[in-house]
Amino acid sequence: MSSELSPLLSVTFHEQGCDHLIELVHQRDEHARRQLASVDVAVYDADGKMLGDIPVDPRDEVVDLAGRLAGHGLAGERVMVVLDSRYDERAFPYRPHHYAFVHPRRAAAAPLYYAVNAVLGGVPDRIGATGINNFETYLFLRRHLAARPGLALGNPSRFATAEAQVFAYYGAQRQTQKVVLEPKRHTEIGLPATLEGEPLGRVEVKSLFKLATYVLARRARSGELVLFDHLFTYFK
Amino acid sequence: MTTPGLPEPVDSMLLCYCTNLTIGELRRAYLDGRWPLPDKERTGKLCTGCLGDLLYCLRRFSAAR
């Protein structure tokens, strides 16, 4: 076991008008809450420009992201929030997990609870995992969505432009979209809810390297989020 | 070779979050002909998130040789 701290870089997206609470460490033990050694939080606009960083005390249990972002001039924008953490593997033998609540203010819908997407360091070398991580899938419920589905993608790399293919499956048919993201850029693409009467059944994202990816769905009229979840790597 | 708008690879930057490889370690190993280092062979192959940056750095270091 190494005394060197292990790194983890996780990414989420935040929209103006939402309450957004991030639980820095989801795990607990019998004696106390486990803590990160450090966490740096940086915020980027859709063009990849860094808007600022948010000082966070790793002893904090929950970070009020919306509150901390107030004053960053983000009216109506979606921003990419990058959490760059260091942790002791003796406290987290696998790795820490950040979870979060997001809720559009004044929305009637319930808050959405989700796992923050671990992008870099999500598969630490010491656990010996061999699965691929850059081909991700999300299965939708087998009924028509009463909302507009979509996909939010972000590229947390420093130097490399990402080209991703997004496949949306409707019964035996599929639609393909290509997304190109320069470093730190992010975007949201729409996915038709139905195709020739068939509901959206699954979406896949394939790229050279892992991106920050979330499926989402919005109410047709208000645009309120009613789904926000990361994709999964089913292929081992 | 530089790409406009991109930061320079700085040695202290952590490149691979799965194997704890810094850009400086990669640069030195590559320029000395020791890449991949014995304990860093899986760089870019675990979470895959750094693979694009790894290939970018290797191209940069190759051009500088």
Image (cartoon, coloured by chain):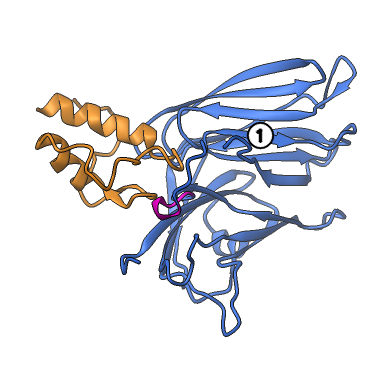
Percent across and percent down for residue B64 are: 12, 28
Chain name for mark 1: A
Left-right relation of B62 to A178:
left
Percent across and percent down for residue A45 are: 50, 42
| Placement of the N terminus of chain A among the 4 image quadrants | bottom left
Query: Image quadrant of residue A234?
Result: top right
Left-right relation of B55 to A13:
left
Question: How many neighbours does mark 1 have within 10 angstroms: few (below 14), some (14-19), or many (20 or more)?
Answer: many
In this rendered view, identify the residue nearer to me: A189 or A100.
A100
**Amino acid type at image mark 1:** Thr
Query: Which residue appears farthest toward the bottom when viewing the image?
Result: A31
Left-right relation of A231 to A159:
right
* Residue depicted at 40% across the width and 39% down the height: A157
* Residue depicted at 40% across the width and 68% down the height: A88
Colour orange, chain: B
Span colored in magenta: A123-127
Disc 1 secondary structure class: strand
Colour blue, chain: A
**Tag 1 residue:** A137
Check if residue B19 falls in the magenta segment. Answer: no
| Placement of the C terminus of chain A among the 4 image quadrants | top right
Decide: is A14 above or below A208.
Answer: below
Secondary structure character of the magenta stretch overall: helix
* Residue depicted at 54% across the width and 51% down the height: A73
Observer able to see residue B28: yes
Percent across and percent down for residue A181 are: 48, 29
